[in-house]
Each structure stands twice: as structure tokens, then as C-alpha cells.
Amino acid sequence: MAFIDMPKPDPAILARREAIIESLIEAVGADAVIHDPAETLAYECDALAAYRCPPLAVCLPRSTAEVSRILKACHRLNVPVVPRGAGTSLAGGAMPTSDSVVIGVARLNRVLETDYANRFIRVEAGMTNLSVSDAVAGQGFFYAPDPSSQLACLIAGNIAMNSGGAHCLKYGVTTNNLLGVTMVMMDGEIIEFGGPEGIPAGLDLVGVICGSEGQFGIVTEAVLKILPKPEGARPILLGFNSNEVAGACVADIIKAGVLPVAMEFMDKPAIIACENFAKAGYPTDVEALLIIEVEGSQTEIEAQLERIREIAGRHDPQVMRESQSAVQSDLIWKGRKAAFGAMGQMADYMCMDGTIPTSSLPHVLKRMQEMSKEYGLGVANVFHAGDGNLHPLILFDANKPGDQEKCEAFGADILRLCVEVGGCLTGEHGVGIEKRELMNDQFNADDLEIQMRVKDVFDPAWLLNPAKVFPIAVSHPRRNRNTGKAA
Amino acid sequence: MSATIEPKSEKELAQLVGEAAARRQALEIRGGGTRPLGNPVAAACIVETAGLSGIRLYEPGALTLVAAAGTPLEEVDRALAVENQMLPFEAPDWSQLLGGSKAGKSTLGGVVATGAAGPRQLLAGGVRDSLIGVRFVSGEGVAISNGGRVMKNVTGYDLVKLMAGSHGTLGVLTEVSFKLVPKPESTATLVATGLDPAASVASMAKALASPFEVSGAARLPDGEDGPSRTLLRIEGLEASVDYRAARLRDLIAPELPAGAELVLETGVDEQAVHWKAVAAVAPFHDRKGTLWRLALKASEAPALLSAIATSCRCESVLDCGGRLVWLLVEDGEAGSEERIRRLVSAAGGHAMLMRADGQTRATVEAFHPQHQRVEEISVQLRQRFDPAGILNPERMRRNAGARAA
């Protein structure tokens, strides 16, 4: 393992392995517990595949009641648990330790209630993100937060990480679309927080639970906002000969009062990679590409595009391409949507996830190219221009000794730069283990202490996903309250 | 007689809070004093935040505002208006409604602490949905930062959401950061008169289920100035507003009850009158009685209002399509508060006491009672942020036994 330390497993727990497994089976039955090492291997990592460790056991409950029984048992046995959605986390949020029990919620996947008059849906949190939109599509509705992994990722994971998606400039992220949760506490108590009424009765506990990375409890049900589907959408593609000009164009569009539903930026390395791979007809001689999408009826789309055309025109674009059909719209998006696949074909890559003030984009890109030369690793950027979320894609060769470490160091430097310019470490993927130690760059000791006090309230024993989010040394005293074991 | 302190910096504030914590001296935290919400606080010392004032960063091209928490709301609104932008949640003026300070100026921090949002929260969410960063001083006098100045931020726990609507019980806000929206180029309001709550909620639900994006849906009751008005607001580029207003009108008109009238209001000033009346809850100004704010599924509101009306005279202003109900109870008997809370709970909602006479405020909890574990979590969070219990003690829940003096 390269950079990221994990706490040493508790030998006392490992020694009790058989008894623990027996208790789990007693709680939920043998067909909901996986303990054969050949099978627990499948849960040893999430999408941060460079870091792996099979857990002690895996539970796959079928109901909130079963989740409660498992947590009660683990609480009694003082065994740490790692909640897991679909394992699509790019930050290692679902990565276990060998003394922990993974609790996967994918079997809790039913729709519980749809209410179009009040515009919400109540679901079990093991439903995939896309299946929620599918459930209400027939009535002309959709669920807005749409991470690119939406075919696979679960609502539970979306809530844990406060996931975003391409639509979030207009519709917000998960926390802006989440009305309530049912959460099972570490002691097994099942609590409802919030609800369809959409306003907290006291403190906004739903608001702090969202984004808590599986460290407060296990969310088994969610009340989600559903919205009427817009009548239509259409993209426009713009090419500029400098990042500065592209950034200025974005700012002017926003200042003009146009709020597109998406604004995607790609730098030259990303454009070339995507064009080689997807052959969508992107211009490869521009420095920056912008894809802007607007929504509404034909009339509204036309009105917004007219504004955008006018503003873009003032910035002397090299390319301005509009879509006249659904096929052309798909083509405009094709390259951008293939970005990760395009990079993956060229080499191994690491996808970073920081946020920066949009005005600092040209500076950050320039610094990144300087660092790229220093590290000897290529980097391409896709950027959610409307909200500042940046995805540097760093290319490396996993077979070359030392390359992964170099790549991680480069990534960490990029994230530090994001913080330096007034942004943050992570805009979508969450902290997990990946950015844990960098939390010291974003926060001081007091900031971290008060966050940990919040976890103290929800999970006093620190059994829920304990090795995540906080730097290992910082969380050490709390993680070892009950055990007195070494870090 | 309370002493008033007005710290001039976060550092000064932190010091005074730290000292107060050491002496276990209760502090009442006040912005402009225009929203006296929650249980009354008994504190010998009032901390006013007006000294922490000023816009620190405003980037219109990034829709970002950072300001000291004591900055007057009107100053912020003015600065944003210059760039044709605004706070997304339409902060309401409740000074006449709640009988708060007439001289005071609503502060940005006060808006955040009380979660004061207006009709546009229907579309944009509450204050917490636009808030992207906070700085605050904890009950121990420690300065804390959470969130920042960027929209997409999932770095660590989201204490930003927790601070919004915490009524000064978790910390004293010193700086707040918002994401903004452009001021709409054009607005139009459909006004349907003479709809009872049931018909009104049904019409609004129809509108809100359409793709025509409604930014306000409210009902003002029958009154001296005329029959009830059900309002649906649309905003955006001019061509878009024209199109959507027409489509919405076609959608709503056929199902209106006999005797109802439907008018499309396009005048800016005329519309402002309607929406300011909703935001400020104008029908309930200078009226006696107990004022509640209910939150529940909109579809439950009409039946609930009927049930409440069987035992008292009451009037309502509906907002957010009926999901938010302002209820004025004019002749509530003893125990009517419990009855109302019971009925609201049964309807799956909750009721906040917004304004009441001294005796009622002294005996009835301002915030709706919650599940025991939720109450415990809330108490413990307050304890962790404010161990000495000095910040607005008992503002959100009365103590079993008092701690600070």
C-alpha cells in the first residue's frame, strides 16, 4: 500500500472471529452473512481499487429491522462496521479493515411511497440512483442529483457522500433534494429524521447526516424530492483559444442572468484524449472547450441559447456549434461523457476531485501544467464550470514502480492548491480515506475537534466507519476509547 | 436590566464568550432583534453582532457572497441588486409580524440563525440551501470554520446546515457565505380569487407538478380588501415567462370552481404587493392572537385547518403550495396549544409557536416536541458546542434543570 495508512486491526476482535460470525448469523440468518474468505474478497475495496483489505465478514440485510439487529450485535461485541452501498466510492469510503464487518444495504431496494401531489418519493436506501428517477418517469418526474455512476450507485451512498452530478448547478446536490431519512443508530435504535414537510422541527439533523460518510448510522430509508421533468434540453459547444477567455465567458453568462443546467469545461489534454477515443468531432486545436446545456420548452431553450450565443460571440470563440437534433446533442456530449474511458484507455489514471473558485481556474490549470512537468506525469482536466468542481485526471503506469506513489503525491499537491486558492479538497467524492490526511490542510485542530464531537453524539463508541474522514492521528484517541489498543 | 456588549471583531467576541463560559454567565445573542423567536432567554448580558459587519467578498461571475454576520440584510440586498443578483430564498421582513425591534436592522447572521426564508424557498430551498460556508464562535469561545466559498463542498461534516436555524444555540455566527442567483429579468403572477384552502392547494399542486417552474405558490385569506387570492409566480427571461404563464393559465383555468376569477398580473409593482404580503404575512399584522407556523404535507393542510377551526377562530396564510401554513388563532382557550400540536402531529407535521402573549410563551414550548432520541441528540449537540450552556440557554428547548445563570 502506498500513502494511506489504516489502523491496525484489533487482535482481540480477530481472535473472536468465529463467535462474531455466529452472532451475526443468529441475528439475520446464514443467507445474509458472508464469511468465507474467498467470498469476502469481493468486498475488500470500492472504486479506489489500489487500497484493499478483506473484512472479517459481510452482512447483506434485507430490511431495516435486520440492519438494526446486526448493529445491535456489533455494538454488543464492540466490532467496527463499514456501511456499503454499491462500492462505487472513489475515495475509499467503503474500504474495510480486517477486524470490521461490512454491512451492505443493496438488498433494501423497494419503493415505499410515491406522492405526486406532494412531490416526494420514499425509498429504501439500497435503490440505485437511476432507479429512483425511473420509478417516477412514467408520471413525468425525475430525481435530480445524477452522479455519473447513477446506474450503479445507491441512494445510501449518495446520502453518505452528499453526491452531486451534472444537474447540480440548477438543482443542487443530494442535501438539497433530501427531505428525510430513516437511520439505524449503532445501538440498533431506528430513528426517523425530517420528512416530506421539508422543514426541520428543530436542528437540521438531516442536513448534518447528509455527507457524514457512514459515520453516524446506517440510512435505510430516504424521503426524496421529485421534480417535474423539463420539456426539453439542448447543448451548445464552444471552443476558445485560452482558458482565461473560456472562464471569462462562463462568468459573463452567469452575470447575464442565464442559469444553464450544466456548464462543462475541458482543457486541451482532455479534449484530445476524448476525441481520439470517442471521435465526436471535437476541435483539437482549441485550448478550452465549453459544453453548456439549457432546459425548458423550445421557446425557452431558444431564448437562453440566443443570450449565450450573443455573450459567447463577444469572446471570439474559435468554434460555436449548436445542435439541431437529438442526434447532434448526443454527439456534443459524447466526447465529454467518454472522458474517463478515454483516459483509461491511454493509461492508468487517478481521478481527483477538488473545488476551486471559478475565477482561479486559469491559474490552477497553469500551476497544474507546471506540476505535471515536475512530476513527469500527464494530467487532463474536466471542470464543472458552474460550480467550481474540478476533476484532474492524472495518468500513470501502475506497472512502473513508484509511479502510483508519484501520482498520489501529485494529486495531493493539486488538492492543496485547491485549498490554497480558496476552494476545498473534495466537491463530490467525499473524504473517505483518500483525502483523510489532507484534512489538516483544510481545517485546523479546532475545526476538526468540533466535527468529531458531532460524531461523538451519534456514535459515542466510534464503531461506524471509524477510520475515515479524520486524519488517523487526530481520530486515534476516540477510536481507541474502548479498546486501549495501539493506533 | 441587561447589559449589552457589541464586539468589534471575531477575536473580541471569542474572548468575551470564553470568559462568559468560564463564569457560566448566560448570553443572549442578538442581530437586529427583528425576529424574537423561540423560548424567551434569561440572560444578564446581550451580545449584539452589529459590530461584525461588512461584505468581505462578492464575485457576481461566480454567484458568491461572503459577509460578516452582523451585516444588515438591506445592505446586502442593495449590493446584490447593483449586479442584478439576489439571495435565492427571499428573506422576509417579519418586524411587523413578530413585534420585534422596530429600530433594529435584520442581519444576515440573524436570517441564518432563524432560517428566515420567504415564498421563493419553494423553488430555491430554505436559507440552508443557499448557505455554503460559516464561521462561528462556539460556546467555549473557540472560532470555527466550516464549508467555505465554493458551492460543491463535501469536505468533512456539513456543520453549515446544522448552524442554519440553530437560533444561536450552537455558536455565534461571525461570517456567512452564500451562493446567489440572478434577479429574474421578468416575472408574472397568476392570481385566482375566491378559492377555499382545498381548491387552492389543489390548484397549486397542479401547477407545481407541471414543468413550468413556479417560484412562489401561496394563498392569502379572505379579508377586508377582498376575497382570498391564490398566487402562482413565474420568473425568468421574458420570452420564457410569457410562454410559461400562458401554459400555466391553460392548465389551472379549467378546474377552477364556479365564481373563481383568474387574472395574470405582469406589473412589477402589483406583483410585489402580493408577494411582500405573503412574505411578511401581512394579513396578520396588528392582530391579536397566537401565531403558529406549521409545516406539513400540503395535501394535509385543508383538512387540518378545518379540524382546528372546529374549536377556535383561526385564519391562515398558505405558502409553498400549502406545505407551510401561517396560522393565527384568535381566541384560543387554555390547552388549545396542545390540541393544535396534537392535530398537526397526527397530520404528520409540526408546529412552531411564532408569536404569543407572555404567559403562553412562558409555558408553551416554541419548538414542536420531537421523538425522544432526536431530543437527546439535540441536547447533546448543544452540550458539545456549548458545554457551559451559555448561548441562548433554553431558546430551543427548556432545560429539565437550569444550568447557567
Image (cartoon, coloured by chain):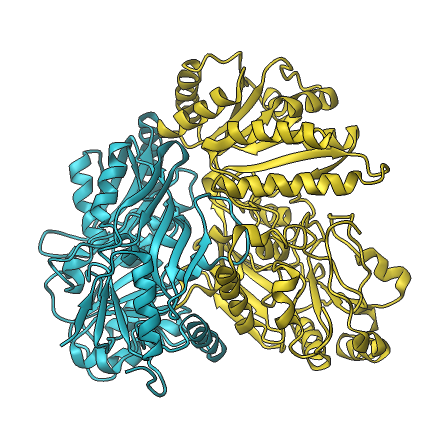
Chain colours: A yellow, B cyan
Q: Is residue A239 left or right of residue B53?
A: right
Q: How many marks?
A: 0
Residue in front for this viewpoint, B344 or A82: A82
Q: Is residue B177 visible?
A: yes
The residue sitting at 66% across, 40% down in the picture is A411
Residue B115 horizontal/vertical position (percent): 33, 58
Residue B244 horizontal/vertical position (percent): 35, 33
The residue sitting at 64% across, 40% down in the picture is A352
Residue B317 horizontal/vertical position (percent): 24, 58
Report which quarter residue A190 is drawn in: bottom right
Report which quarter residue A221 is drawn in: bottom right
Quadrant containing the C terminus of chain A is bottom right
Q: Is residue B299 left or right of residue A47?
A: left
Residue in front for this viewpoint, A328 or A82: A82
Residue A135 horizontal/vertical position (percent): 60, 49
Q: Is residue A69 left or right of residue B212?
A: right
Residue in front for this viewpoint, A297 or B3: B3
Report the residue that reaches farthest toward the bottom.
B401
The residue sitting at 73% across, 20% down in the picture is A276
Q: Is residue A165 visible?
A: no
